[in-house]
Image (tube, rainbow, N blue to C red):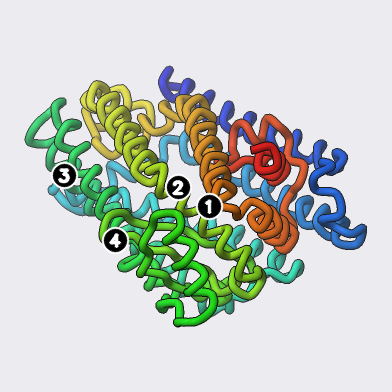
Amino acid sequence: MHPLLTLIIAFVLLEFAVSSVLSWLNGKWMTHPIPAVLEGLYDEEKYQKQQAYMRANARVGWIERGVALAITLAVLIPGLLGWLDTLTTQWTHSLLLQLLIFFAIYMAVSTIVSIPFSYYDTFVIEQKFGFNKTTKTTFWLDTLKSFLLTLVLGSVMLGVIFILYSYLGKSFWIWATIVCAAFIIFFSLFYSNLIVPLFNKQKPLEQGALRTAIEDAAHKMGFSIKNIYVINGSKHSTKANAYFTGFGMKKRVVLYDTLIEQLTTEEIVAVLAHELGHNKHHDTLKTMTMSIVMVAVNLFVFSLLADNPELSHALGGDREHSFALSLVAFSLLFSPIDLILDPLINAVSRRCEYAADAFAKRYGHGDHLIAGLKKLSANTLSNLTPHPAVVWMDYSHPTLAQRITALINA
C-alpha cells in the first residue's frame, strides 16, 4: 500500500472515530438532568417522545457513518478512484473535460449513497414524529434540483480553478481565491433571490399588525427594513426558522410561515431583533471574510502539493499527474485540520449568537426571546442536554440553556 494512502486511511479512520465517540457521548448524556432554567419545557409524555426522537436519529447516524466508512475504504484500498481517472482519459483528450467528468461521477455516486438515508430520515423518522410535510414528489424534485445545482456551480468553479492552474502554475491560488471570493459575495447577496426560489416560494409580508410591529421595532433599533419576506417552510416541515441575508441594498429578512404560526407577534419581533443584532455586529461580513480566508489557506496549501505525483499515485492513478486525484487526496489529507479549525470557528459563531441575544435584550426583547426560543425548541424536540464535548466540537449556536442563562444574566 502506498505510504500516503496509508496516511489517508488513518485520517479517515480518525474522523470516523471522533464522530463516533462524540455520538456515543451524546447518547450517554441524553438522560442527564434537564437544566433548572428549562424545567417544565417538556411534560413527561413529550420528554419521552423527545428521547425517542434523539435515539432514532442516533441509530441512523451510526449506520450512515458505518456505511460511509465501508464505501470509502472499498473505494480507496483497491484504487477505484485511480481507475475512474484513467477511464476519463479514454473518453476525451481534454484535461478540463476529464476533470469535470470525474467530478460529475464522483458527485453522482456520493448523492446516490446519501439518498436512502435522506429518504429514511424524511419519510420514516420525521414522519413518525410529526415533522415531515414533504411529499415524495417534492423530495425527488428537490434532490434532483440540488444535484444539478451543485453540479453546475461546482463544475464552473472547478473549471475556472483548473484553467487558472493550467496557465499560472503554483501562483494560481491567488487568482483562484479572488474568483472564489467573488462567488461567495455574489451568493451572499443573491442567494435569497436566485437559489431559494428553486425550492420554496417567497412573498413579501403583507401589511398588518406583524409587519408594523417589526418595522417599528427595527426603527427603534436604528434599522429601516423594507424587504421582509415569508417563505413557505411548511412545504417541507413543521420546523420553524428565520434568517437575515445579504447586506447593503440587498438586505432581506426572511420568516418561515411556520414561525408565524407558532410564535406570538412579540416573540417574532424578538427573534428578528436577534437577527438584527447579527447585522448590527456585521456578523455576515465576518462570516464571509472567515470563509474567504479559509478558502485562501486551502488553495495556498494545495498549490504547494498539486504538482506532486505521489498524491495521484496514492489513489491508484497511473499517470504522472492528475489534478482530480490530487484534489481528492489533498481534501482527505487536510481533513484533520478541519477537526482543529471547526471547533474554533464554532466558538466564534457561538460568541456572535450571545452578542445578538444581548442586543435583542438591550432593546427590551429579552423575555419574549426566551419565550420564543423555548417554544421553538419544544416544537422541534430539541436535545436539552447535549454533551459539552459535542457542543464544543459541533455546535455553531449555544445550547438553549446557555442562551437563556446568558439572557437572564445580561
* Distance Cα–Cα, label 3 vs label 2: 44 Å
Which element carries disc 3, helix, strand or loop?
Answer: helix
* Distance Cα–Cα, label 2 vs label 1: 7 Å
Name the residue beneath numbered marker 2. Answer: 278
Between residues 34 and 155, which one lies in front from this camera angle?
34
Q: Is residue 312 left or right of residue 378?
A: left
Q: Which of marks 4 and 3 is nearer the N terminus?
A: 3
Name the residue beneath numbered marker 1. Answer: 274
* Distance Cα–Cα, label 4 vs label 3: 39 Å
Which mark is nearer the camera, 4 or 1? 1
Name the residue beneath numbered marker 4. Answer: 250
The image quarter containing residue 327 is top left
Residue 77 seen by the camera: no
Which amino acid type corresponds to the residue marked 3 in the rendered image?
Leu
* Distance Cα–Cα, label 2 vs label 4: 15 Å
Which element carries disc 2, helix, strand or loop?
Answer: helix
The image quarter containing residue 81 is top left
Q: Which of marks 4 and 1 is nearer the N terminus?
A: 4
Which amino acid type corresponds to the residue marked 1 in the rendered image?
His
Query: Where's residue 151, x and y in %?
Result: 32, 58
Between residues 282 and 86, which one lies in front from this camera angle?
282
* Distance Cα–Cα, label 4 vs label 1: 19 Å
